[in-house]
Amino acid sequence: MKSTKLFSWFRKVAFIEGISYILLLGVAMPLKYLADMPKAVSVVGGLHGALFVGMMVLAWESYSQYRKSFAWFVKVFVSSLVPFGTFVLDREWKKEEAELKAAGH
């Protein structure tokens, strides 16, 4: 019996990655260009990069373990490029997680 723990971690990391992206674009970038504080982009950008890598690793593992389609994986990747993309897809992922739990995974 497979656990939904992996998918739950994927959702959590994807959500935090989305927050870090918004902080990068909405706070760190303006600080860099408007307040001459480039360190903000270094810090938030590094954190965002690590979260992005973690999200993609968890997405790949979810894709493999739960036999998702490759289109699902591509959708995850694209959602990470679009501001608020991971938040929009989280509703869909929440339903998928509930279906996995119902199926006994």
Image (cartoon, rainbow, N blue to C red):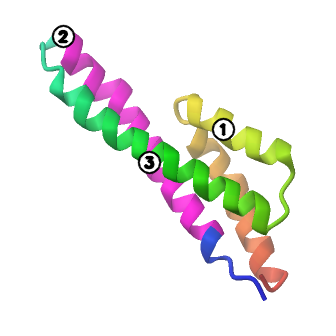
In whole angstroms, how far apart are the C-alphas of marks 3 and 1? 13 Å
Label 3 or label 2, whichever lies nearer to me, is 3
Q: Nearer the viewer, residue 5 or 91?
A: 5
Q: Which amino acid does the dot numbered 2 rest on?
A: Leu
- Sequence order check, earlier mark of 3 and 2: 2
Q: Residue at x 24, y 30 (%)?
A: 42
Mark number, residue 77? 1
Q: Nearer the viewer, residue 54 or 30?
A: 54
Q: Nearer the viewer, residue 89 or 57?
A: 57
Give the residue at mark 3: 51
Residue 105 percent coordinates (x, y): 77, 82
Q: Picture coordinates of residue 51 (x, y %)?
A: 44, 48
Marks 3 and 2 sit apart, C-alpha to C-alpha, by 26 Å
The answer to whether the residues at label 3 and label 1 have Cβ atoms under 8 Å apart is no
Q: Secondary structure at mark 2?
A: helix
Q: Tag 1's secondary structure?
A: helix
Specify few, some or many for label 3: CA neighbours under 10 Å numbering under 14, 14-19, or 20 or more: many
Upstream in sequence: badge 2 or badge 1: 2
The N terminus lies in which quarter of the figure? Answer: bottom right
Q: Are marks 2 and 1 in contact (CB under 8 Å)?
A: no
**Residue type, numbered disc 3:** Leu
Q: Amino acid at mark 1?
A: Phe
Q: Which residues are magenta?
A: 7-33
Query: 61 above or below 31?
Result: below
Residue tagged by mark 2?
Answer: 34
Quick one: SS at disc 3? helix
Of badges 2 and 1, nearer the viewer stands 1
Residue 56 versus residue 46 in the image, above or below: below
- Point 51% across, 46% down: residue: 53
